[in-house]
Image (cartoon, grey):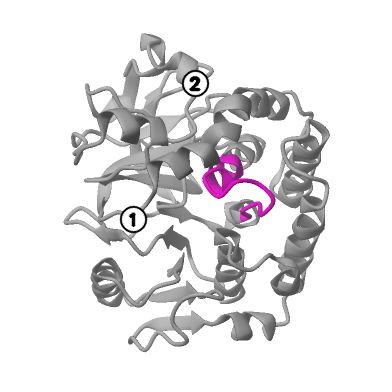
Amino acid sequence: MLAVLTSIQPPTESVHTLLRCLEANHAELIVIGDRKGPAEYPLRGVQFFSLEAQLASGFRLALALPTGHYARKNLGYLIAIQQHPVCIYETDDDNAPNGFWRPRSLRAPAVKIRPRPWVNVYRMFSNANIWPRGFPLDLLRDPDTFRRDETGPDEIDAPIQQGLANLSPDVDAIWRLVLDRDFAFERKDSVWLPPQTWCPFNSQTTWWWPQAYPLLYLPSYCSFRMTDIWRGFVAQRCLWELGYGLVFHPPEVDQQRNVHSFIRDFEDEVPGYLHNRRIVEALGALNLRSGAEKVSENLRTCYEELVRIAVIPERELQLVDAWLEDLADIR
């Protein structure tokens, strides 16, 4: 197992906690730097890549990605994939594993949720009014989106699994502006969302297995607050063509959130408020191809569609192509 994060600050307490957990499980951490931030990361168990080291990596994507951007995390994924880990765990430098954090397996125990267009997973772990960043605002009052009409639990193969975060979960700026407080989810069974069922997922504490590695790609030419959410929509759509659904686990990290401007976050999230429904409708209507050998092709088709509906610019496709070429070279 390898863990990946990007950071523009010295090692945080959350990173130290993560490293203790990784060391106990014979795993290492890949840290991707940027223009700002430390020139080194002198901790045991860390592979640190400064901007200079990234540019010297030989990856096509290293030269094409914008600097000063969260999507440079893509290089961490490529570096990890190059080392052929059993799985990749991604997180951020303000997420500390809690007492329930543990390495995940491809086969996960989870209850199966009845298919429906959208699920508000956060409400399946709480009776409070809360929703994940990227969830459609016009569905917040729809009880069908958080009804736990489950069966199981069963053992389910799931090559993408998302853990929840306590204290400061990944909610949108509207929740922060109106309802902000420390928050704790209930500990309930993990849930599996079947194909054709949408829920936003993020890059805070997420597990990936080789079948899904091409889907790790984060877009650069969109708002910072949408890059992992729109990545998640594309990943879910492509995952369905492999016959898999998405698993969400009860909280496994405590987030001590880095300083944010809620208003700036709101501005960054406006494209999502306006376009998320349209994005999933467009992705859902695509005629993708089934099978593991078609994942990369399907990924590019999804981004071509996002360009066609004008939510991201055409220059994003140059980065997608560089990503796919780098993956092909690794293979």
Q: Which residue is mark 2?
A: 118
- Above or below — where is 134 with respect to 300? above
Residue 187 sits in which quadrant? top left
Which residue appears at 69% of the width and 51% of the height? 221
The disc labelled 2 sits on which kind of residue? Trp
Q: Earlier in the sequence, mark 2 or mark 1?
A: 2
- Asked if the residue under mark 1 is in contact with the one under mark 2, i.e. CB atoms within 8 Å, the reply is no
**Of residues 136 and 280, which is closer to you in this image?**
136
The disc labelled 1 sits on which kind of residue? Val
Q: Position of residue 290 (x, y in %)?
A: 73, 38
**In this picture, which residue range is highlighted in magenta?**
217-232
Q: Position of residue 153 (x, y in %)?
A: 30, 31
- Crowd tier of the residue under label 1, counting other residues whose Cα lies within 10 Å: few below 14, some 14–19, many 20 or above: few
Which residue appears at 37% of the width and 51% of the height? 260
SS at badge 2: loop
Label number found at residue 259: 1
Visible residue check, residue 111: no
User: If the image is split into quadrants, where does the C terminus sit?
Assistant: bottom right
Majority SS type along the magenta span: loop
